[in-house]
Amino acid sequence: MSTTAPHAVAGVDASFDPHTGLQRGSVKHTSPSMVDRVLLRAVNAAPLLAATAPAVRARWLAAVADALSVHQEELAVLGDEETGLGLPRLRGEIAGAGQSLLFYASVAVEGSYLAASMDVVSDTVTLARWNVPVGPVAVFGASNFPFGFGVFGHDVASALAAGCPVIVKAHPAHPRLSVKVASIARDALRAAGAPEGTYDCVTGFNAGLQLVDSLAVKTISFTGSQRGGMALRDRAAARGVPVFAEMGTINPAFVTSAAAESPAAAENIAAGFVASFTLGAGQFCTKPGLIFVPAGSGMFDAVARLVGEVAPAPLLTAGIEAGFTSGIAELSAVAGVMVAAPSDDGDGYAAAAHVFRVALADLMPGSRLLEECFGPVALVCEYDYAGEVMDVLAGLQGSLAASVFTGGPDDSETATVVARMLPNVGRVTLNAWPTGVANTWSQQHGGPWPATSRPEATSVGGGALARFVRPVALQNPDLQTLPVFLATENPWKIPCRIDGVLLLPVPSSFAPKDRS
């Protein structure tokens, strides 16, 4: 990790408007002594959170969801000033963040994340096993989802639900929004009865390094670029701390011959592809960046025509705009035909959509064509028959998601394509684009490296809590040493496996109406 912060100005994170490129204030960096105090508070809070019933933690999260809803318009306006993502998108993201908080609250109350079990092995040996919260967690949120993956997004919510104090680093792309959301969340948690140190926020590059290096921090979560994620992983490796980094990938899509059999079907898929890879100015981690289409289907021409109709949109930061510009230049040097939407020569960080036609023979390991270019750009590769693409699919980098468009349940190519894609991705969507991620028990938002640093993990869905707990075992326990949920009464009402038999007590329900 670099020891200097990009664009640092005299100890502050400067706030810039992507619409104009002009500075709109700044946020002072957190001092080392204040970071130390924040860490101490988190350490003191850790045993209190671990001993708190999930139903109580659920009420804390519900209180934050309520507070975000109350401040929705104020936060959306501030968010647009720093991200340029637009008020409709940001209002929806705030509402989605509130729903996610309630979902993670319900996962905690359900209790299976604790994996509680106990076995009588013999007359002299009894074993109990369960998961415990790891302790203080440091979260480095995303620039492109200031609410969904920001200072109180999926990572924060799932860590708190699992019983871990959280310290989040404000993102330099939206520092004023970060500290405002953090202030609202802290106030809501305090009013709901959460202990001091349950949640806090620090600002500044060096404050982030201090979190990574602190012995108090037991787990780190990150959403962002591969460069940033791997730098965090390497720095934290010096003391063996796990880093769950979700990073950028190319996310391939495949259209079978049957799916593009009619001009209308091909046009519909082309329109969906353009809408998906230009959504949010192409700044989604699940953006489909490469699509394989049947030769003669006319899909490249359709995509090129539709790209020409896409209006320029602001990228999040000057750095992202510079990276997009250099990425387009690099792709142009090795790709074939390029089509671009009309550019915007005005102020701010506006970017025009681009599409490249590439040849199958060019998609070899190590090619620049197989690396992510963050922004509204994608590649189209035509094939003569599906079989010639299979080795290329198997050799692609790990991705968060992939899409397969088929001609229906009788399409003979579908099973082969899906089988080739699954080993390299976390999620395959059939006849759907991957840019929507539902927060549910069955979601998998992760993937093999370089999509993430931990392929077994997910940062969205019921499995997200698993990143913030670890298993322990107690041999020959007595009632005083067992956790309350493995005692006979099981007051937390969670699933427990006793002598190999899974016992499902009547669960404690949690819904919005239960927040009082």
Image: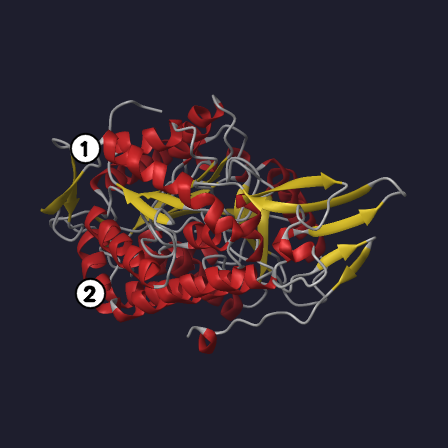
Q: Residue at x 19, y 36 (%)?
A: 29
Residue 429, how many percent across, how many down? 57, 58
Residue 186 numbered tag? none
| Mark 2 residue type | Glu
Residue 350, how many percent across, how many down? 21, 50
Q: Secondary structure at mark 2?
A: helix
Residue 7 numbered tag? 1
Relative to 326, 230 lies left or right: right
| Quarter of the rendering containing residue 411 | bottom right
Q: Residue at x 59, y 65 (%)?
A: 261
Residue extending farthest right: 123
Relative to 383, 516 lies left or right: left
| Quarter of the rendering containing residue 494 | bottom right
Q: Which residue is mark 2?
A: 74
Residue 312, how many percent across, how many down? 23, 55
Quarter of the image that includes the C terminus = bottom left
Q: Residue at x 65, y 49 (%)?
A: 386
| Residue 294 seen in render | no
| Mark 1 residue type | His
Is residue 252 positioned above or below 258 on the image? Answer: above
Quarter of the image that includes the N terminus = top left
Q: Residues within 10 Å of mark 1 (few under 14, many from 20)?
A: few
Residue extending farthest front: 480
Indicate which label's residue lies in the foreground, 1 or 2. 2
| Residue 199 seen in render | yes
Q: Secondary structure at mark 1?
A: loop
